[in-house]
Image (cartoon, helix red, strand yellow):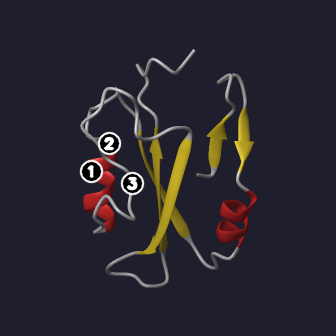
Amino acid sequence: HILQPSEDRKSFTVDKSAIEGLKKITGPCVLVSVVGTQRGGKSTLLNLLHNRSPKPGFGLGHYMDPQTTGLWIWCRKHPRNPNLTVILTDTEGLDSPHIP
């Protein structure tokens, strides 16, 4: 997580270790973010872009409860330009029952 929702879902907590990881990025970077409905394939798409399986990538599941809460990030080098960092962000579904 870079942002994790509070238990009452009315605020966010910033993950300081994620911020420290972002601070270590040198050089140019691009942000890829996927936003959409719950169970719409956002995490699956990002795992494919990152070339990761769900573990340890963006979590997947056959559940109605969201597997992604708040805002998750993964960083990787661009596959054709090693001087460029790609930041992939995954979000909780907009129609999640947990979104007020």
- Secondary element at image label 3: loop
Residue 11, position as x, y percentages in the image: 72, 29
Does residue 42 appear left or right of residue 7 in this picture? Answer: left
Please report contact status of discs 3 and 2: CB closer than 8 Å, yes or no: yes
Please report contact status of discs 2 and 1: CB closer than 8 Å, yes or no: yes
Residue placed most toward the observer, 51 or 61: 61
Measure how far apart labels 3 and 2 are at the Cα level.
Answer: 9 Å
Question: Residue under circle 2?
Answer: 42
Say whether disc 3 or disc 2 marks the residue closer to the N-terminus. 2
- Secondary element at image label 1: helix
Q: Residue at x 68, y 76 (%)?
A: 24
Say whether disc 1 or disc 3 marks the residue closer to the N-terminus. 1
Q: Callout 2: 10 Å neighbours few (<14), some, many (20+)?
A: many
Q: Where's the C terminus, which quadrant?
A: top right
Q: Residue at x 39, y 81 (%)?
A: 81
Residue 57, position as x, y percentages in the image: 38, 61
Question: Residue under circle 1?
Answer: 45
Q: Is residue 41 above or below residue 81?
A: above
Mark 3 belongs to which amino acid? Answer: Phe
Which label was assigned to residue 58? 3
- Secondary element at image label 2: helix
Q: Residue at x 32, y 81 (%)?
A: 80
Does residue 100 appear left or right of residue 57 in this picture? Answer: right
Mark 2 belongs to which amino acid? Answer: Lys
Measure how far apart labels 1 and 3 are at the Cα level.
Answer: 10 Å
